[in-house]
Image (cartoon, coloured by chain):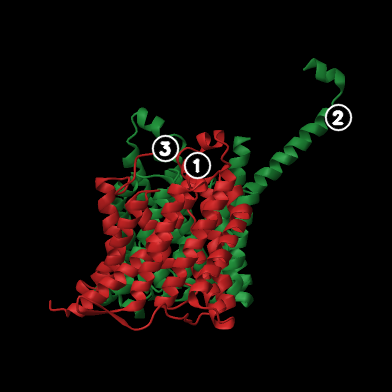
Chain colours: A red, B green
Amino acid sequence: MNLPIEAIWQGLMNGLALGWIYVLMALGLTLIFGIMHIMQFAHGETYMLGAYVVYYLTASLGLSLLAAMALSMVVMAAVGLVLERLLFRPLKMDWASAVVGATGLTLILQSGSVVMFGLYHRNIPLLAQGPFNILGTVVPKDRIAAVVAAVVLSLALYLFLKLTEYGQAMVASAQNPEGAILQGISPNRMSALSMAIGCALAAAGGTLAGSLFNLSPYMGLVPLVKGITIIVLGGMGSLPGAFIAGMTLGLIDGLVPILFGAAWASIGPLLLVIGILVIKPQGFFGHAE
Amino acid sequence: MQNKSSLASSVGWALAVVLAIVFPLALSSIYWTSVLTKIIIYVLMAVSLRTIYLVGEFSLGHVGFMCVGAYTSALLTLKAGLPLALTLPVGGLLAGFTAFSLGYPFMRVKGIYFVILTVLTSESFRQLALNWKSLTGGIDGLIGFPGAGALSLPGIGQVDFGGPNEYYYLTLSVVCVSLYLLHRIEKSRLGFIWLAIRETDKMAGAVGINVLRYKVINFSVACFFAGIGGALLAHSEQALSAMEGASFGIMTTIYLLVYMVVGGRMRFEGPIVGTVVLSLVSEFTRPVEEYQPMIIGAIAIAVVMILPDGLSIIPEKIGLWRFKSLIAKSKTDLDPKTQEGL
């Protein structure tokens, strides 16, 4: 097989950008799961809504992409707070009811956005324009900008969890809810915080993806599936695991279709998960419950 | 009491079957017959989904096994020219076998982890069907495979199932037999072992039940019937598409879960009630088609918040309430003397 080196570079950069967007999804999902023990199946819809908020802010208010993205993260964080209070807090006790609640929410948000935004594709401004030279190969700048933005956000989350009081309280609440309550950490407040941060990260991911590709009401499904795959591969609640699994999935998406064909790329993550489950059921970095 | 309730339930089942037989004749419209065929197929899907819940697991990947059954049956009739009487069970068996081989790694995890794996499975199968162009037609889908056609039935001879009404009755009989089998399995020793695993899997393991093996059996049985449902659906529509919005998308899988939970996951008839009620709701809200998923989603959320045991529990609740009021009444009616005598 003789592939031009440009095609491989292109696939690599695409894979890297996709991988980081998936990591943003997975971080939100794993944060929400860690605190609330709920799998937020409507996370893909949050991602999609975040991108549409950016679309309206840039198209009708004329804001710059960065400002619109920040505002959209704030808006989706508020949506996350409302959802936590009205839907997920009452359902937190029974995981099965929570699954139904989250999937019901998916139906509502997805069909709602089909009604509101229509089925045709839309575009938001590019992150950056023009090519970029790395080691003598030409790479589009917007891929690199997306990677940088996602890395900054992930790093910010990491520092928040490690260094601030609220971040440490969240970690404590995820590790041992009863112990955290004894220390005066309210589980409900932590749940609200995790939903707000998770939704904001999803909105950022949606914006980055929307600027690289385009917007549609169904755009949330693939990143949702990738996000939950990352959680299984990397181990629930593990940030390094999420990072490695995200890169792996991104590179599968970027490179495998070029090298082996699209059919392998579609079945690859499943085979990977099966392999991991057979060898180490807790994921790369997970630990047994 | 036992006899009375079992009599009532037999009457209920008989009534349901009679209604299902009479409806297409009474309505006599091809449109409604095709709607009813679809509802009956989804009844089988929702009931077999509940079979997985017998070991305490939710699957959001049932539609993936439906996809396996549908494509298997369609491709066998299209490329090998086999009759439906052969391809239907083969479609089910292949779906069951796929579930069997996935079951060993998957059933090692529980709860939400299993849900995640099943979502991944069904999406992977759909993507595979979308991308494996040489076999499945890719984005164009698969069209032009034959419907049921003439099948030879033992004792009756050749019967033509080509028409919509005939196909409806074929579907109805296959689904009835499947439901009967699922019900028998649930009431058998195997079913009780599944329930034991759902209640406390560690205890079940301690008394010598091979938990993993029985969970894998459960998953395979449920997915076998999902494959049957898929094959029935394929030959009813005679066109298959793996696109996002088509039958094998994530929406269908969510709908199946909602049907099961809204109907009631603790009772065998729950998914049947849920599927029929919600499908009819979808059907009657067709004028506002774009709001349909919203309505179904709202019903799902309302049911899990207000009535977590589902709609099929309502008669029992009313019965309990009447029973209680009856007791209260009889207490006030009773003569204090006779009460002392008791």
Tell me: residue B111, above or below residue B97: above
Given the image, what chain letter belongs to the residue carrying mark 2? Answer: B
Give the image location of residue B66, x and y in percent. 39, 63
Question: Dot 3: few (<14), some (14–19), or many (≥20) neighbours within 10 Å?
Answer: many
Task: Say which label, 3 or 2, has the lower sequence index.
Answer: 3
Which structural element holds mark 1?
helix
Task: State how many labels appear.
Answer: 3
Q: Which residue is mark 3?
A: B197
Q: Quadrant of the N terminus of chain B?
A: top right
The residue furthest left is: A1
Which residue corresponds to the image point at 46% horizontal and 69% vertical from the top-left?
A206
Question: Dot 1: few (<14), some (14–19), or many (≥20) neighbours within 10 Å?
Answer: many
Q: Which residue is mark 1?
A: A173
Which structural element holds mark 3?
helix
Question: Residue B177: in sight, yes or no?
Answer: no
Would residue B271 appear left or right of B324 to someone viewing this image?
Answer: left
Would residue B189 appear left or right of B341 to someone viewing this image?
Answer: left
Give the image location of residue B44, x and y in percent. 46, 58
* Numbered badge on residue B333: 2
The answer as to whether the residues below labels 3 and 1 share one chain is no
Which residue is nearer to you in this view: A274 or B319? A274
Q: Quadrant of the C terminus of chain B?
A: top right
Question: Residue A138: in sight, yes or no?
Answer: yes
Alpha carbon of mark 3 to alpha carbon of mark 1: how far? 30 Å
Q: Report the amino acid beneath label 3.
A: Ile
